[in-house]
Amino acid sequence: MAAVSTSPTAAAAATAAAVVVATVGYWLVAEQRSIARKSRGIPGPSLPMIPFFGSIFKVVSNPFDFYAKQEAMGQLFLLDNARPLFTIPYLDASTHMRIRKSALPLFAPGALTSYITGWEREMRETIESWVAAASTGSDDMKGTEYEALAPKLPAGAGVLHMRTRLHIMTMNASVQALVGVRNLPAGVTVEIFAAEYSKLNAGLLSLPVNLPGTPLNAAIKARKTLSVWLHDAVASSRDRINRGEEPESVLDQWIFSLKQLEEDPSRRSAKQQPVSDQEVTDIILDFFFAAQDATVSGMTSLYHVLGDFPDAVRKLVDEHVELRGPRLEKPLTTDMIQHELQYTRRGTIVIPSILHGSRNTAIDETFDRFDPDRLNPPTGPYSDKPYWTFGAGKHLCLGKDYAVSQLVLHLSLMIERHVLGGFHFQRCATPDDHVDIFGPSVFPKDGAYFVW
């Protein structure tokens, strides 16, 4: 058999390739050994990360476990999938300041009143639908890994999965409060909007690979679709406001505020540049993410925590009865929600993801104990100390009152339904009911099953 000849050029190329591979391999091994030596004694994984990929496979394969370990080590991990999906985190300082100043009126007390009205209507209708579903024996545990743990229920009672149902409720509330259903383009329903938003959300914890068919690619496409719809919503809102209609949503309030600046330039400082329609579109989408996921997390936590602390439920009932009468005959008012329901407000600030800022051992060494009275002036250890859940100073969250008011309102309606019958804060026990997961905000792993 004739020998296969190799040209000098091919041989040289093969040799060069072998040298490159060997060099890169040696460098990788040396680099990893150097990292391991320098990080000896520092909290973290014992084995170095995969070169070029870092922790990406860990976060995608099991994001809940990954973030829990990061939290335990006091480390911060940022998966940069958010860059093509959101705007606010990547604004330069001057633009951020300009937009923040323009958005301040959106969360003023007067504006919040209009949002609260819509929230209450949506929440009341939703809670009554839950009661109706439970009365027919609805059992959300069926078909899940927890099905065998479902309790035996009396006639007229059911088991509801609170995270799932709260997600649907808050989606409806967020579209109404932030965008306004009347501003959505023709043919775009809340359900269609929610489906596109779910694609965007799924891209946050996916591999950072933007190729056709990948979750990140689908998220970027969903972001573009949502942007088109919201841009149309901006135009619709401006048309309604120009006709003299009253603002009904955050978007309407913003368009109304911009209209005032256009009609009376003296309201704007000489250096203040106007906010464009595209900027309004981008920021409303960012607001939507902040309001939707954080609110579902907060509301699920309300059920999660109060299911464990009947004493807190009794205090909440006493507070509501004192303000509204034995059968809660007095209607809820904005003033009650924002000022008078003090124990309710303290009881709602249970944000598991905010650790280092809110767990200050110099103030209170028992921060892991559920104790809303710690915020009770003038005796509580936090009564005259900074509370960092929503930031502080120039970085105070614009939506602080928006978020707290929404949580307080829902908690008040929970207590109302408890007093009038239909809900008893009875948690269905599962092996995962006290395991926190990250996805991307914090939830009890089982999603909180409750008897209604």
Image (cartoon, rainbow, N blue to C red):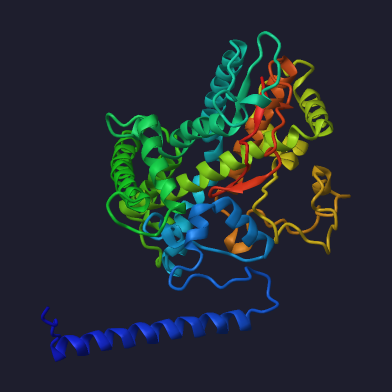
Of 335 and 213, nearer the camera is 213
Where does the image place residue 58, in percent across and percent down from the top left?
52, 59
Q: Residue furthest right?
A: 379
Q: Is residue 446 above or below residue 100?
A: above
The residue drawn where x is 53% and y is 79% is 32
The residue closer to the viewer here, 15 or 161, is 15
Q: Which corner quadrant of the image does residue 157 belong to?
A: top right
Instruction: Say which of 161 and 248 sits in front.
Output: 161
Q: Is residue 335 visible?
A: no
Q: Is residue 224 left or right of residue 296?
A: left
Q: Could you tell me if residue 171 is visible in this image?
A: yes
Residue pushed farthest left?
Answer: 2
Percent from the top left, x then y, of residue 89? 46, 61
Q: In the image, residue 240 lies at what x, y percent?
A: 32, 34
- 379 or 365: nearer the eye? 365
> Please, is residue 290 above or below residue 4 in the view?
above
User: Is 372 rendered above or below residue 21?
Assistant: above
In the figure, is residue 330 to the left or right of 232?
A: right
Residue 230 lies in quadrant:
top left
Question: If the image is split into quadrants, where does the N terminus sit?
Answer: bottom left
Number of marks in the image? 0
Q: Is residue 164 above or below residue 261?
A: above
Residue found farthest to the top: 155
Quadrant in which the C terminus appears: top right
At 29% from the left edge and 56% from the top edge, which residue is drawn?
A: 211
Q: Position of residue 382 (x, y in %)?
A: 80, 54
